[in-house]
Image: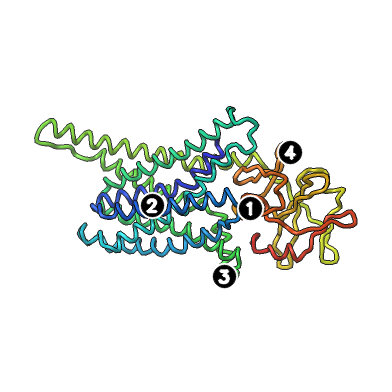
Amino acid sequence: MLHFLILVSETLLPVAMLLGALLGFAWQRRLFEVRTPAKYGAALGLAAAASLAGLKMGTGFIVREYYNLAVLLVTIPFELLLLAYLFRSRAMSSEKAASPLMRAMFFVVAAAWTAYYLPDIFIYPSHFAVGVVQVVSSEFVFIVVGYLTGLLLCALSCRAAYKVCADIPIKTLFPLLALLLLIFIVQQAVVVGQILLGRGLMPRYDWALDLIIFLLDNARLTFIGLVAVSALLALILWRRSRRAAITGENPAEVRKGRSLMNSRIRWSRGYLALLFTGLLLLTVGSYYNNLEAELSPPLAVEVKDGRIALPLAMVGDGALHRFVYTSRAGVDIRYIVIKKSETAYGVGLDACDVCGAGGGYYERKGQVVCILCDVVMNKSTIGFAGGCNPVPLPFRIGDGNLIIDLEDLEAEESRFL
């Protein structure tokens, strides 16, 4: 339950907070003309996300990194344009603010966000029954409940962000909304940098590598920043609503004003509670969830004559074996070996095209499991590309050894940067 609750929240909660804030801004500025292009954009992104998820589950031949890169390279410039336009629109009337450019930005951003963040939401249900002994069981029910609870948390957070930002004075909302969007862009830029450097699509300058590594090691800081700014918005509305003087020409108007202030206070409190829940979930919850599985340290093996020779007597027991080779550039390249049957071995990198090299594989009750997404591997498919399978690594059997050429490992160095 906890695992899928964290996965869904980690994927959707940041964009839910920002989306709700943008919708609140659009409501305050009476930008009703952006609703239609945003809906069409969301429908386009939804179709792209569903198509990617279907291809990923059906074929496994889609390299998600290239898809993410293409989407983000389109998204980030439009987000920056939207950020600049937010400040320009302060002095505009609602009619001028809802210009064709603003409508185009909402269309592109809505399409890109749904296309980027929803594929995983569609893919996660395909993992529900993997490794579950009985589909009709409490374990399966808890998994589904965790997934649905994550969706509910994100939906409520989006709604609460909208209600809060729709009632905050526009002069206060502008800078904080801009800060939210800027933090969000930084979060996406880190992903772009990671893909470009990891795939060798840009020069590997030392400063760029150090910066990306630092940002990846402190990835939670961007989420904490989003939560902090969102919490500040909620606190501002709460404080203003508590101190507001309620007046009216008759008791009915006074009651109406008091009801409005109480509603704002409730949404502010509710949003703070949701933010605290999300923060607790993705920090403390993730910590305890990751404690459930610990990777055994990979073993270093002697290299001789440009190859690694692993005795079959060592790796032929049917258990998962993890090894590491340090490349000529000093990069640790992890790989795994497991005997699948009497005559077949599965050999691959300790990384996959879905999760990258940030995770790894471990053995649980005789099954090979991805530590990041908790997907159980079918042993017979290890050594073949696709899905969450380890990236295949060429090998051969000879003289009682499983032999791996160093050049094949060196060729995969970029995945472990």
Q: Secondary structure at mark 1?
A: loop
Percent coordinates x, y for residue 301 in the rendering: 81, 56
Residue displayed at 75% across by 56% down: 324
Q: Amino acid at mark 4?
A: Gly
Which disc, if any, is residue 198?
Answer: none
Percent coordinates x, y for residue 175 in the rendering: 33, 56
**Classed neighbour count for the residue bearing mark 2: other residues with Cα under 10 Å, few (<14), some (14–19), many (≥20):** many
Q: CA distance from mark 1 to mark 4?
A: 21 Å
Percent coordinates x, y for residue 13 in the rendering: 45, 46
Residue identifier under label 2? 42
Residue identifier under label 4? 366
Query: Answer yes or no: do the residues labelled 4 and 3 have beta carbons within 8 Å?
Result: no
Question: Do we see residue 283 in this rendering?
Answer: no
Question: Do we see residue 75 in this rendering?
Answer: yes
Mark 4 or 3, nearer chain start: 3
Residue displayed at 26% across by 43% down: 240
Mark 1 or 2, nearer chain start: 2
Q: Amino acid at mark 2?
A: Ala
Residue identifier under label 1? 386
